[in-house]
Image: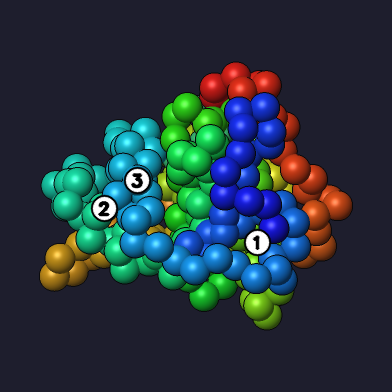
Amino acid sequence: MASRQRSSSSPPNCRSTSRCSSERSDDADPPATADDAPRIAEVWEAAWRDGHVGNIPDELLVHRGSASFRTRTSAMLDRTSVAEIDGLIVGFVTLTHDEVDQLMVDASARGTGVAGALLSFGARRLIESGNGHPWLAVVTGNARARHFYEREGWRDAGHLDYEAPIDGGTVTVSCRRYELIRDDITAEQHPEPPAAGTRGAG
Ligand SMILES: CC(C)(COP(=O)(O)OP(=O)(O)OC[C@H]1O[C@@H](n2cnc3c(N)ncnc32)[C@H](O)[C@@H]1OP(=O)(O)O)[C@@H](O)C(=O)NCCC(=O)NCCS
């Protein structure tokens, strides 16, 4: 398992609250820490806006203020793995049952391989824990994310009305269901991503 600290010339290091790496995930994970929550919430809010504003009903935006990201982050820490560069969290993946529930990468780390490392880590975790058919929901208009998932070996399995939770109910969001079409993700197949910054920010 890669250590938490890394230099800017080494590959992105994933760790989880649970920690993640491109290595197999049967290594012992360091314990979760609530200290990560503020930065996770910050990355989540900014990345969520990048991928969703303009692609979701305005009604949902009203319910997605900063406080909502902080509250929901605290509730998912034990299912969340993060990637960090120079000790700073730059992305995270959250798993729920057989679903890649959240995948968010800070704008500064897009196009660097961090997202691919997080996604393959998450998929491998799901498979290794007996969920042989990982899936995820992506907002229909989120073209960058959809292209990314398809490049990473996921397939569009059709329309999905996703019920996004809000206080006292849900808001229906038009999404696509994506499924992993290969179940043989290993460290060999998805090696350490390139050094941060070698492809520039996406
Ligand atoms: C989705 C996300 C995790 C992907 O990580 P990333 O580091 O940006 O991904 P990459 O740069 O490796 O790949 C993006 C691909 O989309 C392409 N792309 C960029 N903008 C695009 C657009 N508007 N339409 C279609 N494709 C686009 C890139 O060229 C690249 O493809 P390529 O490698 O074939 O050239 C990241 O962009 C992100 O966090 N976005 C905001 C939050 C979000 O949408 N999360 C997903 C929720 S389901």
Name the residue beneath numbered marker 2.
69
Disc 2 is placed on an element classified as helix
Residue 125 appears in which quarter of the rendering? bottom right
Q: Is residue 118 visible?
A: no
Mark 1 surroundings within 10 Å by alpha-carbon count, few (fewer than 14), some (14 through 19), many (20 or more): many
Name the residue beneath numbered marker 1.
123
As drawn, 194 above or below 172: above
Q: Quadrant of ligand 1?
A: top right
Residue occupying the point 69% across, 45% down? 152
Q: In the current view of this chain or complex, which residue is farthest to the bottom?
A: 130
43, 37: nearer the viewer: 37
Measure how far apart labels 3 and 1 are at the Cα level.
23 Å
Residue occupying the point 86% across, 52% down? 188
Image side of residue 56 versus residue 123, left or right: left
Image side of residue 39 versus residue 191, left or right: left
Amino acid on which disc 3 is placed? Arg
Amino acid on which disc 2 is placed? Phe
* Residue 165 location (% of width, % of height): 26, 64
Q: Which mark is residue 39?
A: 3
Q: Is residue 1 visible?
A: yes
Amino acid on which disc 1 is placed? Ala
Measure how far apart labels 3 and 2 are at the Cα level.
11 Å
Measure how far apart labels 2 and 1 are at the Cα level.
24 Å
